[in-house]
Each structure stands twice: as C-alpha cells, then as structure tokens.
Amino acid sequence: MKIAVLPGDGIGSEIVAQALKVLHRLEQDGLRLELEQAPVGGAGYEAAGDPLPEATLKLAQQADAILFGAIGGPQYDALPRDKRPERGLLRLRKELGLFANLRPAMVYPELAAASSLKAEIVAGLDVLIVRELTGDIYFGEPRGIATLAGGEREGVNTMRYRESEIRRIAQVAFEAARKRGKRLCSVDKANVLETTELWKEVVTDFGRSYPDVNLSHMYVDNCAMQLVRNPKQFDVIVTGNLFGDILSDEASMLTGSIGMLPSASLDANNKGLYEPIHGSAPDIAGKGVANPLATILSTAMMLRYSLGNEQAAGRVERAVQQVLREGYRSADIHTPGTRLAGTNEMGDAVVAAL
Ligand code: NAD
C-alpha cells in the first residue's frame, strides 16, 4: 500500500512524525507500506509557490491513502486567496472526490472529566458521524444575493440531493455501522424539507440490503438535543452536509479534547484522507508539546478504512488507551496526578504499548 504523507504546517510535522513511528513499528510486524512525503499548505507555497503543488497532487492521486497533518498559519493570512494554505486542502478534497467525512467522537473513561458535560453522561462515549461532504445547500444552484424590484436584497441558497448522492453516502454509513455496533441513525428534517424527505426514503430503501444493521431516523433538531442529553444512545449517525457540519462539531466538543479526535474523508473506493480535526496550532508549534494522539488515531482509521486492516487498527487504538491508562498526558489533557509528556514522549509511549 502506498501512503502519501503530507505533514503541512505548524505542529503538522511534529504530530505526523509520531504517527510515522507507529507505522514503522507495525512494519516490523509485517505490515507492508510505501511511505512518501510531500509539502502541502504553507509548506507547499514555500516549496513551489502553490498550496497544492502539482507533484503533491500527483502523489496523492497515486496513493492508496493520504496521511495529513494540518495546514495554515498567520504568516500566510495576507496571501491572495488562491495561494492560502486552506485552498490546498479544499482542492485536494475536491480533486480526489472525497464525499464522505467520518468523524468519530470518543471519550476515553480516563478523560471524561475534560468534557463540559457531566462525566457520567460522556464516559465511554463512542459515536461516529458520517457527513456527506460534496453536496447539499453548500453547493446547490441557484445561489447568490440579488436585488429585487423594490431595491430590497434577497439571499438564496438551494438545498439539493440526488438519489445517487444519497445512496453512496448511505453505503459508507451502513458499511461503517456493520464494522461497529450495527446501529445507524439517519438524520433529516423530512417533516419540513422535501430534499430530506427524499433522503429518508432513499436511506430506508437502501437499508433493506443491510438487514443486520438497525436503522432509525431522527429529526435534526431532536438530534442536536439528544447529543447533549444522552449521547451514548448513538452508534453511527449519517446526515447531509449542512446538518453534518453542525452536528459533528457539537459531537466532537462533547469530548472536550481537540487533540484526541481523528477524521477520515473517503471516496467511492474507500481511498481516504486521514487527519486530526484540529488545525496547525501556531501558538504551540515547534515547542514539542502538541498532542499527537488525534493523528495516531487517524492512522488507525486509515488502517481500518483504506487498508482494510482491522487488526492493526484495533492494536493502535488499544495502545493509545493503554498510554492514557498508564497516566501519560500531553499539556492539553493534563490534570493533576497524571504524567505530563511532550509530543515525542507520547509517541514513544504508544510505540512501547504496541
Ligand atoms: P487550531 O485547531 O490549530 O488550534 C486551536 C487551539 O487548540 C489552540 O490553542 C491550539 O494550541 C490547540 N490545539 C490544537 N491542536 C492541538 C494539539 N494537537 N495538541 C494540543 N493543543 C492543540 O485552530 P486555530 O487556532 O483556529 O487555527 C490555526 C490554524 O490552523 C489556522 O491557520 C487555521 O486556518 C488552520 N486550521 C487548519 C485545519 C486543517 O488543517 N484541517 C483545521 C482547522 C484550522
């Protein structure tokens, strides 16, 4: 398997270095990988005048999966829009057709106190949000701001989904649920919006080929409430781009620790881009204090979804849990009585646990 490794900017290279240590450790046990690095984001701009250099895009296209650090930094904020680091990531997602965004929100019992909710509500939480990433009101036409006859302005966006777009995200969600707790909740607003009425119909129909997965439906307003009332009721949630944008941020913040959360963005063939949900953290870059666990857990998702290696994925996740149980904590999750560890030490501890 060929992996494109794109560390990016800020803490990107520090955290990706820890994920590489983990992959090298797995290679010692027989995992066969070809790893190749390339610059992206601000680093891409500095190397080639483009946040997504041609050679980086080519490498990403040829690879079976992409391990991504983070991009961005204040030094790039004054660049023209098309040269900014964020453009590199958006273009990469578009060029590769990554339409399925998978965001697990997990709360390790050891970190339950970090949540803004009561520990008993979130301890052991393990929910996966599957968000459609390339359709819906964010892309629908017509769109724009027009001036009406009387001089008043009107803003317009269009919520649209085709059956084929709904079916392909439903497939990703059913497959993911099958690999987990076999419960899928499809979130819509079918009582008001025809687009999501179609969504509900197509998901229900598609679900007939997954009799082993228990499918339920929930309105988005209720889901937003249930996520803070009783988040442990969910296994996998599937929803459109707009609702998923909001619900996945809500769910990730239940955990209270941005440095712990991985993500995957997949295409139709399970090729994926794997990255922590956090950014390049310029405030702590170069200090050796960043939490590498979100990136290491993204590597576990890569092993599971793109490389089909559930065993190795589980090993990495259990190693992370063991490190937390042993008391290692980077500064962002450190509490009195636990052992403060830098980026390198956290990575080494995961390798030792493996
Ligand atoms: P951020 O996620 O980089 O940082 C927010 C806060 O969380 C900071 O205090 C940071 O120190 C902390 N933090 C983040 N990751 C951490 C980690 N692994 N360990 C410990 N602490 C961590 O968000 P921001 O400050 O809003 O953005 C900084 C830059 O990152 C911007 O240029 C932004 O555009 C970019 N960004 C990139 C991505 C991405 O690459 N996908 C995502 C979000 C933001």
Image (cartoon, rainbow, N blue to C red):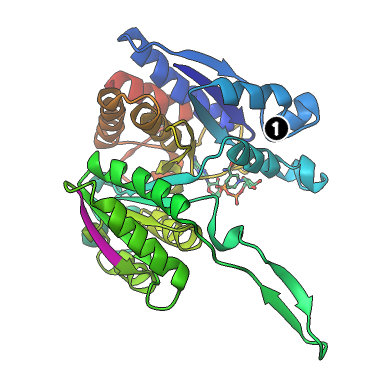
Q: In this figure, which residue is indicated by the disc labeled 1? A: 52
Q: Position of residue 10 (x, y in %)?
A: 63, 35
Q: Is residue 4 left or right of residue 325?
A: right
Q: Is residue 40 above or below residue 212?
A: above
Q: Position of residue 159 (x, y in %)?
A: 55, 66
Q: Nearer the viewer, residue 68 or 172?
A: 172
What's the residue at 43%, 18% (across, down)?
A: 21
For the question of whether residue 322 can be seen, the reply is yes
Q: Position of residue 136 (x, y in %)?
A: 53, 60
What's the residue at 50%, 45% (across, down)?
A: 99
Q: Is residue 31 above or below residue 68?
A: above
For the question of whether residue 116 can be seen, the reply is no
Q: Is residue 223 left or right of residue 213?
A: right
Total of numbered circles in the picture?
A: 1
Q: Quadrant of the C terminus?
A: top left
Q: Nearer the viewer, residue 298 or 289?
A: 298
What's the residue at 47%, 62% (across, down)?
A: 246
What's the residue at 44%, 55% (across, down)?
A: 163
Magenta region, residue range? 213-217
Q: Secondary structure at mark 1?
A: loop
216 inside magenta stretch: yes
Quadrant for residue 225, please give it. bottom left
167 inside magenta stretch: no
Assess disc 1: are there few (<14), some (14-19) or many (≥20) residues with their C-alpha within 10 Å of its C-alpha: many
Q: Is residue 305 left or right of residue 344?
A: left
- In the image as oriented, which residue stretches furthest toward the bottom? 150
Q: Position of residue 110 (x, y in %)?
A: 26, 45
Q: Is mark 1 within 8 Å of ligand 1?
A: no
Q: What is the magenta segment's predominant secondary structure?
A: strand
Q: Quadrant of the N terminus?
A: top left
Q: Nearer the viewer, residue 335 or 27?
A: 27
Q: Tell me the kind of residue under disc 1.
A: Leu
